[in-house]
Amino acid sequence: MKNRSELREIAMQTLYQTYIYENSKLEYDIKTIIKELLEIDNEFVYGLVTGVLSNEKEIIRLANKYLVDWKIDRLSKVDKAIISIGIYELKYTDTPPLVAINEAIELSKKYSDEKVTSMINATLDKIYHEEVEDGR
């Protein structure tokens, strides 16, 4: 059984694949992609992926508002997936904010460079303090 950190990584990989399919205007099924990566259905992964995709406009708006000198579409698809999961968990789930931010940072350390990791950390921290903390 995989832990939540490993499942977030599967969610990130699933989102990455959906971005490629969408970019190529190909049809896809989220459950099929997850099953290829995980071999079993997993509600946590499915919930993260569908949550990000169904709240994509708001997630993009928040990312673009708080990214400094960047827009989310300029990020790599992997970085877009990582920051999108972080924003989704901060705004729409009961995941403790520190966990949501740290999990995104750990994924970024594994898949990105230091500058991107710092940017994701700063962006999620700003979103937490300016969009989430006040609303709790």
Image (spheres, rainbow, N blue to C red):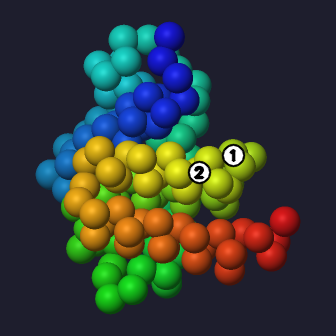
Residue farthest toward the bottom in the current orientation of the protein: 69
The residue most toward the left is 24
In the image, residue 119 lies at what x, y percent? 38, 72
Mark 2 lies on residue: 100
Residue 53 in view: no
Sequence-wise, the earlier of marks 2 and 1 is 1
* Above/below status of 5 relative to 95: above
| Residue beneath the point at 44% across and 54% down | 105
For the residue pair 117 and 40, the one nearer the viewer reads as 117
Residue lying at the far front of the rendered structure:
114
Seen at 24% across and 73% down, the residue is: 74
User: At x 62% / y 48%, what residue is drawn?
Assistant: 99
**Residue 135 quadrant:** bottom right
Residue 56 in view here = yes
Residue drawn at point x = 20 percent, y = 49 percent: 20
How crowded is the residue under tag 1: few (<14 C-alpha within 10 Å), some, or many (20+)? some
Tell me how far mark 2 sits from mark 1, CA to CA: 6 Å
Where is residue 133 shown, x and y percent of the image? 77, 70
Residue 94: image location, x then y, percent:
74, 46
Left/right of residue 62 with respect to residue 40 in the rendered view: right
Given the image, on which type of amino acid does mark 1 rest? Thr
Q: Secondary structure at mark 2?
A: helix
SS type, badge 1: loop
Q: Which residue is mark 1?
A: 95
**Left or right of 120 on screen, residue 115:** left
Q: Is residue 17 left or right of residue 90?
A: left
Question: Could you tell me which quadrant the C terminus lies in?
Answer: bottom right
